[in-house]
Image: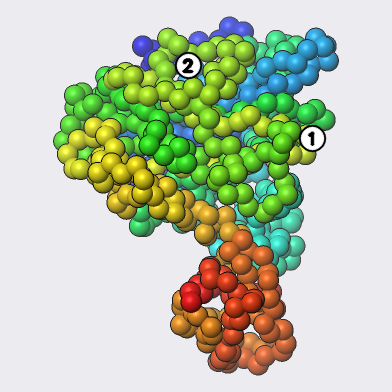
Amino acid sequence: MKRLLLSLFVAVSLTAAVWALPKEDTQDKILTNPTNVFDLQNSTVSNVEFYSTNYGIFGLNIRENKGGGIWPRGSQNQYIFGGGFWFGAQKFVKDSNKLKKLVEISYNPNNGRSWFVPGLASDCDTMETGDNQKYKCYFSTDFDNINGTDLNNQTNPNWPLWINDSLYRYEYGTIRNEFVGDQSKRNRTENPLGPLFVSNEDIVSVFKDSDLRFYDGGMVLRKAQGYPLGLKYESRIYTWGTGDMKDVVLVSYLAKNISQDTLNNCWFAPVSDVDIARKPNDQAGAGNDRFSYFTDDSSQNLAYGWTNGDQGEAGKGFGYIGLSFLESPAVDGNGFIRNDKFIYEQSEQLGLKTFRNWAIVEDKFDDYGRYDFISSQRKDGDTGPADNRMMISTGPFNMKPGDVARVVIAFVFAMPAKGGEADGTYEDLTGLKRITDKKGGNGLLATNSSLIGKLNQAKTNYYSDLKSGVKTTENSVVNTLSISPNPASNSANLKFNLNDAGLTKISVLNQFGQEINVIYNSWLEGGEHNINLSFEKNTYSDGIYFIRLTSGNSTQTKKFAIVR
């Protein structure tokens, strides 16, 4: 029934809507020359195969109206039909003199539509149609990692993210390294430290909520209700091709309030139509899925799904899909997004507040129904096999004009830890017998290959590497940088080679990417150098640090630890 409703919508469209579904590019490989403003592309690197767009839809193969989330890559094992997010807020609407509940959606599971359009709101409110390249889905695998230029066509726009600070992070409420809309500034002249790449395949896009022609219900109705909220969105997807992270996809959303309104009691809710089924039997196979919130450790911020396996999935290598908030907003005593620290511990963040799994007959179609649904703070358990949707939500938080809400979701895939078919038990999720009083640094202990184990690894990678703000793989005239011993105690030897002579700075950064000490800052000749580092206890406590060498416009960074 779900597919029938969606197919009817694609064929007929809603009578109240002004515009039909957009036309996406028809190829399913990485393109450097999209043929339409609405871009649809398939990932190429990680063990998770998925479609992405430049207007907020994740997973869905819109061109063929088919599920587009496969694991492992190259198999017929589908996990995601389609997904995106809902953003709910209470906004004072002057015409009605009321505080109204509004919800914008990047993916409507009932009809497959997004209300957003590609582009930056700073350009114009409506969608630009003249330049298909400008706001396409940018895949890092298409770009040179030194100059950020397109590998296949040098006339295409350069990579849109650049390191305009020695640390790539957002600080004090301002996003550092925002999407560079001005293509003339996407170069090393403007950004000497080069383009910003994080994973084996980064996928970057920007979209906006200001073109009411694409809203369900149409422009006239939605404008009268108080839309748009006035948000610009940036999506960054990180994927890896090796190790446990090859089975993890991190989706980062930055939502910035560019309106003059304060948005109250906001909720951010990733929504996924999870269909765990063997293609081409995905419609029947979706009817035996199971979903639950992970109650054993709330700090995992985890909801997960598996299949009963009685519709052709048994023996075909199916496991678990998990959705978790790796990062969510932190708020002050008045509920406003905090901007007083570089990094907030997960205990300071809002985390997962609502988890719902629901059938198509329970879909919400009005603003108040959707808002109350994502803000209910209800956490559903396993309700038995069904063809259900899956939603996690974080909130509430208030946003002043200029505030930025940052949310990072981990999609994690893992086989049953016990072997055989998934059964949803604690032992199958962790690989261990139930232990309620023994935890590791990232929550419950678990075997590395289990769902919880892979989620713990994703947290470690995110907070120690990605979120630390320290880039450790810069292209540089500095090479063969090493530090030994590592871990160090009271001293260590730094060895490196300079290809060219130049002003050289050696500094120590803490785990958050903040420079805490400059060891050396002078002219060095080209060639090999050895410098002894001393770590006095009153200056350096035990922990993770980074050594950064800067020579001219080039840098290289190495992580090290001090353990006494």
Query: From this viewpoint, which residue is outermost toward the front?
Result: 437
Badge count? 2
User: Is residue 445 depicted above or below 66 in this figure?
Assistant: below
- Secondary structure beneath dot 2 equals loop
Given residues 325 and 556, the one toward you in this image is 325
Residue, disc 1: 401
Residue 430 percent location from the top left of the image: 30, 44
The image quarter containing residue 501 is bottom right
User: Is residue 362 visible to the viewer in this orientation of the structure?
Assistant: yes
Tell me how far mark 2 sits from mark 1, CA to CA: 32 Å
Left or right of 543, for residue 452: left
Q: Residue at x 64, y 76 (%)?
A: 539
Left or right of 423, for residue 515: right
The image quarter containing residue 274 is top left
Residue 155 percent location from the top left of the image: 63, 54
Between tags 2 and 1, which lies in front? Answer: 1
Q: Residue at x 45, y 11 (%)?
A: 362
Amino acid type, residue under disc 1 in the picture: Pro
Q: Residue at x 36, y 49 (%)?
A: 438
Q: Residue at x 71, y 89 (%)?
A: 523
| Label number found at residue 110 | 2
- Secondary structure beneath dot 1 equals loop
Given residues 227 and 154, the one toward you in this image is 227
Residue density around tag 1, few if under 14, some if 14–19, many if 20 or more, within 10 Å: some
User: Is residue 22 visible to the viewer in this orientation of the structure?
Assistant: no
Amino acid type, residue under disc 2 in the picture: Asn
User: Is residue 521 depicted above or below 163 in this figure?
Assistant: below
Residue density around tag 2, few if under 14, some if 14–19, many if 20 or more, within 10 Å: some
Left or right of 204, for residue 213: right
Residue 350 percent location from the top left of the image: 58, 37
Say whether disc 2 or disc 1 marks the residue closer to the N-terminus.
Answer: 2
